[in-house]
């Protein structure tokens, strides 16, 4: 009886070992693929952050405003401020 049990158990044990080896390799490949994808996303994110910093720089905006929109920065003495206080009275 013990011999039959061993004869049936050993192939089942080997089958489980093969199945687990296959599963391990599959999970390892999935993990490697996901790590590579994560690295790609991180590098893409870094590039996008650098692009945002470059595109939102004040020097670039000033250059666009002056060269493309032909706007000129006003001097503080050229600015007129109007304050509206209660009941429609103007305080300039």
Image (cartoon, rainbow, N blue to C red):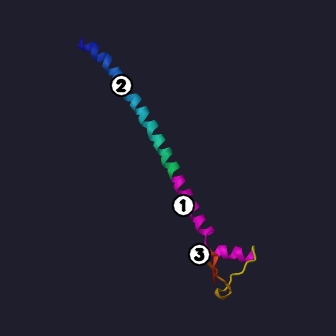
Q: Is residue 71 left or right of residue 28?
A: right
Which mark is drawn over residue 46?
Answer: 1
Q: Is residue 65 magenta?
A: yes
Question: What segment carries the magenta color?
Answer: 39-67
Image quarter (top left, top right, bottom left or bottom right) of the C terminus:
bottom right
Q: Are marks 2 and 1 in contact (CB under 8 Å)?
A: no
Residue 33 locus on image (x, y percent):
50, 44
Q: Earlier in the sequence, mark 2 or mark 3?
A: 2
Q: Nearer the viewer, mark 2 or mark 3?
A: 3
Image quarter (top left, top right, bottom left or bottom right) of the N terminus:
top left
**Which residue is most to the left?**
2
**Which residue is most to the front?**
87
Residue sitting at x 32%, y 21%: 10
Q: Are marks 1 and 3 in contact (CB under 8 Å)?
A: no
Kindly report the distance in space between the C-alpha atoms of the residues bearing marks 1 and 3: 50 Å
Main secondary structure of the magenta stretch: helix
Residue at the disc numbered 2 = 14
**Which residue is most to the top?**
1
Q: Is residue 59 magenta?
A: yes
Callout 1: SS: helix
Which mark is drawn over residue 86?
Answer: 3
Residue sitting at x 55%, y 58%: 45
Q: Nearer the viewer, mark 2 or mark 1?
A: 1
């Amino acid at each position: 009886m013990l011999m039959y049990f061993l004869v049936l158990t050993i192939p089942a044990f080997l089958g489980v070992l093969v199945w687990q080896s296959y599963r391990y390799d599959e999970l390892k490949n999935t993990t490697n693929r996901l790590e590579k994808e994560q690295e790609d996303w991180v590098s893409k994110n870094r590039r996008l952050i650098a692009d945002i910093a470059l595109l939102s720089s004040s020097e670039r905006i000033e250059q666009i405003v002056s060269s493309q929109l032909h706007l000129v920065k006003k001097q503080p003495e050229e600015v007129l401020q109007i304050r509206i206080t209660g009941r429609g009275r103007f305080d300039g």
